[in-house]
Image: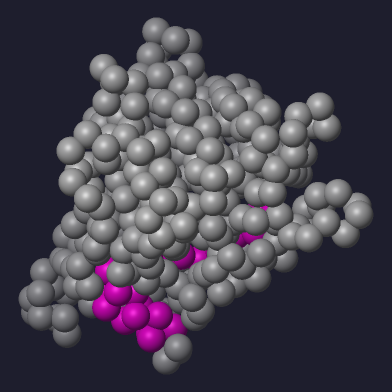
């Protein structure tokens, strides 16, 4: 397929025709999500002129202070998806519990989860941020309607996953389980245009992403892995490493998708009862599937992230993802500990 001016809509229709990997309800749902991301992108672009910067002075269920854009992006996604007829319910980082599609709208067979605005600390400083989403199939109805427990499916059950990054370009990255495709927003045309297909992450890398300020709190396997990277040419790895940390998972993962690298947000001693900082269902799962579909790997240090069975909606998880050989190495250090 030529990458010349193929819109997201046409790409999805062709996928549906060619290999049947996208049922029409799912295709329409993905188009609605893309449209919502376009709307969020417009708000992000307006910045101070649109009055969208700064704090909303409220807290989400995770105890984090919400930014105005966290709330705006959440509302845009809910409003766009509510009446589309493809969904039964939604869940979001910014909502305590699930949001059912109201009875007055047609009910669909999918569940949508999202981190409406990822990288919130970067909103006010004009650094790349994004939206992350994951689509699951609604389990068989047991007569009780959709429950939160219906969402608690392993990441391997996802039927679509993606993110939209609001950076120098607005870019949508998507998988439905047959590779990873990337679409760039053409602002003149107002549509996402296919700009890369079958993205592959190199298996080896010389670049790692971790918040180094937490070093003193890490467990031994992470200390060992990063210590060896920092030792460079003279150390056991025999090569120098570079470091990047944008503090927007979306932007760090996007860089890894484009040129390789390893991203880590490990468990640490600051809050030992938490498995990690990032959320399993709407951050780690969609990103892990995208990374795996691009030939990379994603674990929590011990297990494949996509095999984890969530116990709750806002569950947290340690994350190691990106170039396969590096993820396997840092995972093996945990196994050896
Ligand atoms: O500020 P820290 O501890 O480095 O954490 C950065 C991480 O937190 C996040 O911003 C969490 O996402 P939210 O902004 O959606 O809460 C990730 O995108 C990023 O990788
Ligand atoms: Mg996030
Ligand atoms: Mg967020």
Quarter assignment of residue 243: bottom left
Q: What's the residue at 25%, 52% (across, down)?
A: 197
**What residue do we see at 18% from left, 38% from top?**
4
Residue at image position (44%, 10%) is 50
Q: In the rendered image, which quarter is residue 38 located in?
A: top left
Where is 224 relative to 249, above or below? below
In the image, residue 233 sits, relative to residue 137, either above or below, namely below
Q: Residue furthest bottom?
A: 336
Q: Residue 5, relative to residue 217: is it above or below? A: above
- Find out whether residue 323 is within the magenta segment: yes
Q: Is residue 218 visible?
A: no
Q: Is residue 303 visible?
A: yes
Residue 145 pos. (x, y %): 86, 49
Please identify the quadrant where the C terminus is shown.
bottom left
Give the image's coloring scheme.
one colour
Residue 26 screen position, x and y as percent:
55, 46
User: Is residue 298 highlighted in magenta?
Assistant: no
Residue drawn at point x = 41 percent, y = 43 percent: 13
Q: How many marks?
A: 0
Q: Residue furthest front?
A: 17
Magenta span covers which residues? 313-334
Snapshot quadrant of residue 211: bottom left
| Along the viewing direction, whichever of 201 and 53 lies nearer the viewer | 201
């Amino acid at each position: 397929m030529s990458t010349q001016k193929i819109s997201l809509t046409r790409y999805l229709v062709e996928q549906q025709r060619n290999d049947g990997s996208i049922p029409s309800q799912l295709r329409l749902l993905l188009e609605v999500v893309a449209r919502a991301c376009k709307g969020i992108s417009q708000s992000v672009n307006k910045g101070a002129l649109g009055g969208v910067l700064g704090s909303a002075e409220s807290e989400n269920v995770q105890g984090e202070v919400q930014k105005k854009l966290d709330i705006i992006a959440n509302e845009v996604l809910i409003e766009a998806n509510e009446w589309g007829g493809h969904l039964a319910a939604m869940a979001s980082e910014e909502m305590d519990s699930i949001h059912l599609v109201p009875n007055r709208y047609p009910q669909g067979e999918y569940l949508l989860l999202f981190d409406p605005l990822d990288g919130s600390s970067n909103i006010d400083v004009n650094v790349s941020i994004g939206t992350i989403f994951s689509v699951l199939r609604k389990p068989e109805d047991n007569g009780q309607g959709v429950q939160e427990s219906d969402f608690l499916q392993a990441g391997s059950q996802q039927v679509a996953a993606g993110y939209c990054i609001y950076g120098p370009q607005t870019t949508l990255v998507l998988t439905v389980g047959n590779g990873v495709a990337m679409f760039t927003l053409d602002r003149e045309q107002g549509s996402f245009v296919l700009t890369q297909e079958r993205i592959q992450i190199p298996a080896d890398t010389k670049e790692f992403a971790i918040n180094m300020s937490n070093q003193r709190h890490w467990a031994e396997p992470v200390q060992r892995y990063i210590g060896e990277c920092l030792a460079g040419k003279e150390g056991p790895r025999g090569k120098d490493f570079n470091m990047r940390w944008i503090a927007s998972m979306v932007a760090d993962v996007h860089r890894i998708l484009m040129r390789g690298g390893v991203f880590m947000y490990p468990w640490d001693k600051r809050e030992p009862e938490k498995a990690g900082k990032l959320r399993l269902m709407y951050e780690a799962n969609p990103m892990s599937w995208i990374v795996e579909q691009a030939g990379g790997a994603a674990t929590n240090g011990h297990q494949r992230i996509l095999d984890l069975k969530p116990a709750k909606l806002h569950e947290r998880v340690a994350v190691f993802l990106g170039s396969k050989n590096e993820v396997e190495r840092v995972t093996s250090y945990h196994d050896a500990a």
